[in-house]
Image: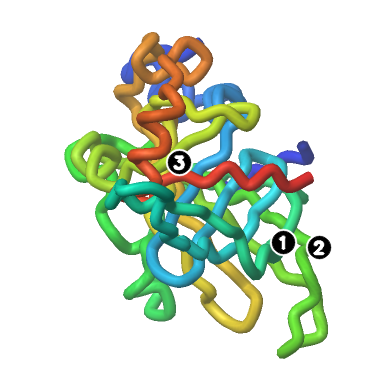
Amino acid sequence: SAIELDGSTKKQSKTLAASALDPIMLAHEIHQRLSKLVGLCAQLHPDWWSYEWCHQNKVTQFHVNIKSTKQGGNSDKAQQEFQLEGVTSLGRYSNRVINLDKYVTSDKEASSPQSIDLPQERTELGRVIDTFQGGDLCPETGKPRVTEATFRCCSQRILTKTKGGVLKNGEPVETDIVTIFQAKEMEFCHYNITLCTPLLCDDYEDDADNNPVTGSSKSDSVLRNTIKDQRKMINLQIL
C-alpha cells in the first residue's frame, strides 16, 4: 500500500506488529522519523556535476571550479578558491509517498539503485519518495526540471562508505543520519536521488551520535581540509 502525504521510535517487534494491524500507524511513524531530517542538506560530488538535496525544501545541481593560486613571498603553498558554476534548480518540494509494500524490481529498474540490496542484514520498514517540482526550465523538453528523492534503509557499512557532507541550517554537522547514495539524470531533466538513512531501518534507535542537533560541528580548518581532500561539502548559500 502507498500513502501520500502533503506536506519516538518503537522496538522492532512492536513496530512490525503495528504495521500488520494498521499500516496508517506505521506510515505515520515513518513520517515522524523522517522529521528528524528537517533543516538538513546533504551533498554528493561524483564527477563534473555536484548535487545538494535539502529535506523537503529543494534540490540543486552545480559545478565546483577549484582554482589554485600561489601565495606571495617565498611560500610554496598554494591557496585554493572554490567557485560555483552552472547552479541549477532541480525542483522544490511538492509531495511525499510512503510505500509499505514489499518492493519488487521491474525490468526497467533492474540496474537502478532501487534494485540494490542496501539494507543488507537490516529490515526495511518501507520506502519513501519525495517529489520536487518546478525546477529551472529544461532546454530539451521545454518543461521545468523534476526530481524524485527515494529514501532507503541502508546498512551501517554502506552508510559509512557513502558518507558525505551534511549541513544543518547552513552549518556543517557530523552525522550518519542521512547520506546521498546516488544521483542520476534518468532522462532529460528528470532526476533521481537515492538517500541512505537508518531512519527507515527496523533496528534504528535514536542517540546523540546520530542526532544532527547534538552532533558536533566541524571547525573551519577541518571543513577546509574535507573540501580539499575529498570535495565533500560546499556551502551554497542559495536562497
According to the image, label 1 marks what residue?
A: 89
Q: 10 Å neighbourhood of mark 2: few (<14), some, or many (≥20)?
A: some
Identity, as a three-letter code, of the amino acid under mark 1: Ser
Identity, as a three-letter code, of the amino acid under mark 2: Gly
Q: Is residue 125 at all visible to an observer of this figure?
A: no
Label 2: state its secondary structure: loop
Residue drawn where x is 41% and y is 15% of the image: 216
Image height check: is 234 above or below 67?
above
Cα distance between the residues tagged 1 and 2: 8 Å
Residue drawn where x is 57% and y is 28% of the image: 171
Which of the pair 232/198 is nearer the observer?
Answer: 232
Image height check: is 78 above or below 167?
below
According to the image, label 2 marks what residue?
A: 134
Residue drawn where x is 38% and y is 63% of the image: 46
- Of the two numbered discs 1 and 2 in the rendering, the one whose residue sits closer to the viewer: 1
Which of the pair 47/30 is nearer the observer?
Answer: 47
Instruction: Locate the C terminus by quadrant.
Output: top right
**The label number, if any, that marks residue 126 in the structure image:** 3
Identity, as a three-letter code, of the amino acid under mark 3: Gly
